[in-house]
Amino acid sequence: MWRDYSTSFIRKNRASSISIMVAAFISALFLSLLCSLSYNFWIYEIEKIALEEGEWQGRITGEIDENDLDVINNFANVENAVINEMLSEGSKVVVDVYFQNMRTIYRDMPLITGKLGLEDNAASYHELLLSRYMIHDPQDTNPPLLMAFYLALLLVVSASLILIIHNSFAVSMNARIHQFGIFSSIGAAPKQILTCLMQEAAALCMIPILLGSFIGIALGFGVMQAMNLIAIEMGGRHEAVFQYHPLVFACTILASVLTVLISAWLPARKLSKLTPLQAIRNTDELCLRKKKHSPILFLLFGMEGELAGNALKAQRKALRTSTLSLTLSFLGFTVMLCFFTLAGISTNHTYFERYQDAWDVMVTINDTGIEDWEQEEEIRNLQGVRSSVAYQKANAICFVSEINMSDELRGLGGLEAVAGNSVTIKAPIVIMDDKGFEEYCEQIGIDPENGGSIILNRIWDSINSNFRYKEYIPFIKENQDTIILHNAGQTENSAEISVLGYTQETPVLREEYDNYALVQFIPLSVWSQISEQIGNAESDTYIRILGEDEVTLAELNELQAEISQTIRQEYMVEIENRIQEKVTDDNMRKGFMLILGAFCSLLAVIGIANVFSNTLGFLRQRKREFARYMSVGMTPEGIRKMFAIEALVIAGRPILITLPLTAAVVAFMITASYLDPMEFLVKAPIVPITVFILAILLFVGLAYCIGGKRMLKCRLADALRDDNIM
């Protein structure tokens, strides 16, 4: 009987049934996408760790021979044990151990070292890799949280979806209170009513859950492919391959089913607990317990505005989900667009625009000192190379007395007032190849013949300028012929070198210099004389290359490939070019915007689906309401006006809430980043925000248009003759 009744109700009430199916579909889609992406991010992280650090799970270090290696391999849980040739030295042998069941590694490794007669500290663990499998040392008080975070996120999302989609079930079920009151009066038990409602929910949601899950998997695959395309130019990144596991699908289905069933169970349980008299007396109408006025709507739209305001207040609880979803989606969308716009402006200021004339191609020669680099002339003579400079960086310090500080600096209160430092000053050294140093000297008009240091004599005036628009003043008086540089780690080691000149103009290099340091530019020939005393040179050498004027991306790519072929294989290098870096940065920003924008759009879809659900689901409840209005003289045009006002309020409320909040957030971000507000206004994302607003208005208006047309098709007499009026 109940099954036949449920089937009949579903067939005759397609609008409410569709709203429930859409809610279940969106829920399953969202959960499936979340689960598939989380699983693939987890797999990608494990692959990254394995590529960078190896797949070993445990290591044993000590005097180990072939017999000991057999002992390790014969241990019950050991899958394989191999000698690490790269880490082994002499009698000190390092063995990488792989286990069949990693979860017992912290118990098995001490047993293995005990059998070999080694100390406990001979065993080490690949803690980063193990942590990704939620395996941690029992003695560790801070266990890994990555997988726990994924599970917590899934739980939070499920709980949020329950709060969002349960209203679709409530609308459908509340429309039948009167019917179930009659069933209850003739003997139907509350448990039977609850079972009937849950069977309906299961019948309606089974196919949408499966369909949403499969489409979520497809979207997950699409997101991974999009991320690969966006990050295709990123160096040192391995390609992400979409993977899926049956357990992930089972987890998705379980989460979706539980989410939908709990969403349905909440209103069903409440409905089943009503007494027959309470259910039969329910008039199924929207009404306010206390009449309230809507002065703004009345002022703007007259009596129809007042009536629309009362109707919206009566639906306030049901529309809470719509308002929340639309507000969060619009707020997230606008703040995201504004944030990425400001981030782009900031990045252009501090990197691309600042250094666009300082480099075209950068070569990083890993673990090679500038004195060991032998191909500078070959690079400089390549076709398309206008300028090339090889340089290396080193750390040093110097001591500056107050009397030697510039008058401008002393006028601001000295070094401590500006930088909060003592008289010990950082003196980073930029070691340039001799020819590049000569070009720099020519650039600033200094004779390099005697050899020595050029001092970047400037310090940031942090009192009278901000970090975005820095102003500099002279650091020291320009009356010293020599400067003493000290080893940054051993100050007793020092070297005195000649000062060729002072300048506030830096060489054409892609470098950021310390705000409160006396930067030294010296040639390689001078560094060769003081390197033993100063030391602390960084391990890498850099080559800054300028191409022809107005060079294109294709030309830079060609030059980059030619440089790569020219450099001998004995050098480990990384090569990048300026235009490709800009393209990659733009693509990465667009990728993040795409993913976050899709999430915001999904929230908007949930909100709009809830509007459709309410509008179509409350149709029966509002027939009598509008029948009364028409009986006292309201025309169909007045009803259409009421619907238009309601749609405008539902769509407009999130916009009115969001725009001031977004303006406040943007104002805070502009202030915090010290950007000129006019720069943001010129590039403000007005078009996409306007499109998002129009989309919300369009779909909310469409929901009310459909509902209004169905309402006006009803006959006045039929609506007023409803037998449940008391």
Image (spheres, rainbow, N blue to C red):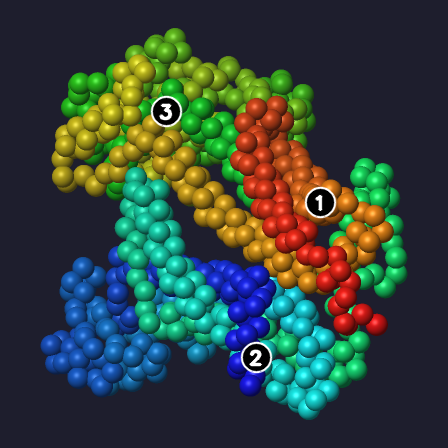
Residue 271 vertical position relative to residue 637 in the rendered view, above or below: below
Quarter assignment of residue 13: bottom right
Whole-number angstrom distance, CA of label 1 to CA of label 2: 35 Å
Identify the amino acid type marked 1: Arg
Q: Is residue 607 left or right of 399 when viewed as pictured? A: right
Q: Amino acid at mark 2?
A: Tyr
Check the picture and name the quadrant holding the C terminus: bottom right
> Mark 3 or mark 2: which comes first in sequence?
2
Q: Which residue is mark 2?
A: 5
Residue 684 in the image, given as x and y percentages of width and height: 57, 30
Q: Secondary structure at mark 2?
A: helix
Identify which residue is drawn at 83% across, 61% down: 288
Mark 1 against mark 3, which lies toward the viewer?
1
In front: 628, or 406?
Answer: 628
- Which label sits in the foreground, 3 or 2? 2
Q: How packed is label 1: few (under 14 Cα within 10 Å), some, or many (20 or more)?
A: some
Q: Residue at x 83, y 48 (%)?
A: 633
> Which kind of residue does numbered mark 3 sit on?
Leu
Q: Nearer the viewer, residue 493 or 585?
A: 585
Determine contact: label 1, label 3, CB under 8 Å.
no
Q: Which residue is mark 1?
A: 640
> Please, is residue 501 above or below residue 117 in the view?
above
Separation (CA) of disc 3 from disc 2:
79 Å
SS class, disc 1: helix
In the image, residue 278 lies at what x, y percent? 79, 79
Q: Are marks 3 and 2 in contact (CB under 8 Å)?
A: no
Residue 438's disc number: none
- In this rendering, the answer to whether 357 lies above or below 588 is above
Q: First in sequence, mark 1 or 2: give its number.
A: 2
Question: Which label is found at residue 509?
Answer: 3
Q: Residues within 10 Å of mark 2 (few under 14, many from 20)?
A: few
Q: Quadrant of residue 606?
A: bottom right
